[in-house]
Image: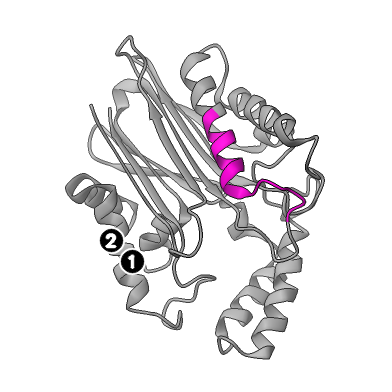
């Protein structure tokens, strides 16, 4: 078995808000991986005195424990219980109903001799490499399916001059439109993250693949997935080949090179010049 992880903050002035962990049971049969990408705090605050790094550490730790030790629970059950535990840990000090309460994307994978289970919530990605070398991306694409008018607002903002008052105003309007869709159950075009409501776990993308059909899995936060989704340097199979050859750090180094080659975000429009980037490779 080969397990490799790497993470790198988008800025040395800000803490890394990603979380990555892998657990291998003492029995030697199977394992579990957890990858989280915390949502950067909003300028208007979060209603939480702890912060996003605290939240993802708490949520990630609970997910690792439960997914590794409670095989009787589904991954969705593990996520629901982990959200509930984390919420309880700061309900007495923080405003959990705040729109911007700390939250995170989630990727979980768990395997044993029979099956590989997966769960994906929001815009991080899980890659599954089959026995023949084919690569399947498991994605929660609801962010890409926001209403057309919201996606048009995003495109308009990215076309404006960075640093201009016009862009700042349009960006604020776009941000409000997106926030109105975040975790908005029952609203058309909504998308979901792990925050304080355990019920969101039932909205994650889940599935199971026979163990014999899988030889490796990889998880990428959207900062690492930029290589494919933003810079279009090949597809997911190419990203997986790079992970196998150069490891997660090699992939992140390639992302940083692409970002640095477009410092104004003009050729490849994106919300941040650099983003936290984290990757896990598990050859199982």
Please report the residue visible at 24 percent of the width from the left and 55 percent of the height from the top: 250
Q: Residue 86 location, x and y as percent?
A: 67, 32
Please report the residue visible at 44 percent of the width from the left and 62 percent of the height from the top: 10
Please report the residue visible at 45 percent of the width from the left and 83 percent of the height from the top: 266
Q: Is residue 265 visible?
A: yes
Circle 1 crowding by C-alpha within 10 Å: few under 14, some 14–19, many from 20: many
SS for dot 1: helix
Residue labelled with disc 2: 253
Left/right of residue 1 with respect to residue 17 in the rendered view = left
**27 relative to 184, above or below:** above
Q: Which residues are magenta?
A: 46-61
Q: Quadrant of the N terminus?
A: top left
**How many labels, in total?**
2
**89 relative to 16, above or below:** above
Whether residue 261 is in magenta: the answer is no
Q: Quadrant of residue 257?
A: bottom left
Q: Quadrant of residue 205?
A: top right
Circle 2/circle 1 CB separation < 8 Å: yes
Q: Residue 195 location, x and y as percent?
A: 69, 42
Left/right of residue 214 with respect to residue 165 in the rendered view = left
Give the numbered dot on residue 256.
1
Whether residue 58 is in magenta: the answer is yes
């Amino acid at each position: 078995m080969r397990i490799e992880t790497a993470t790198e903050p988008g800025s040395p002035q800000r803490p890394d808000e990603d979380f990555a962990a892998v657990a291998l049971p003492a029995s030697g049969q199977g394992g579990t991986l957890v990858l989280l990408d915390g949502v950067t705090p909003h300028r208007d605050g979060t209603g939480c005195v702890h912060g996003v790094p605290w939240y993802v550490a708490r949520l990630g730790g609970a997910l690792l424990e439960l997914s590794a030790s409670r095989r009787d629970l589904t991954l969705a059950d593990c996520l629901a219980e982990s959200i509930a535990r984390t919420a309880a840990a700061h309900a007495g000090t923080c405003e959990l109903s705040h729109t911007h309460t700390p939250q995170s994307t989630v990727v979980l994978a768990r395997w044993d001799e029979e099956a590989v289970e997966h769960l994906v919530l929001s815009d991080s990605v899980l890659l599954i490499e089959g026995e023949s070398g084919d690569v399947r991306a498991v994605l929660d694409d609801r962010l890409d399916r926001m209403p057309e008018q919201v996606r048009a607002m995003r495109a308009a903002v990215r076309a404006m001059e960075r640093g201009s008052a016009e862009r700042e105003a349009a960006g604020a309007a776009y941000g409000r439109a997106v926030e109105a869709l975040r975790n908005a159950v029952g609203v058309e075009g909504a998308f979901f993250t792990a925050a304080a409501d355990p019920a969101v776990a039932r909205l994650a993308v889940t599935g199971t693949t026979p163990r014999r059909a899988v030889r490796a899995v990889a998880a990428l936060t959207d900062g690492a997935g930029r290589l494919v989704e933003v810079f279009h340097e090949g597809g997911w199979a190419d990203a997986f080949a790079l992970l196998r050859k150069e490891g997660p750090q090699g992939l992140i180094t390639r992302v940083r090179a692409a970002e640095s080659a477009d410092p104004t975000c003009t050729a490849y429009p994106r919300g941040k010049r650099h983003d936290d980037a984290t990757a896990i490779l598990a050859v199982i």
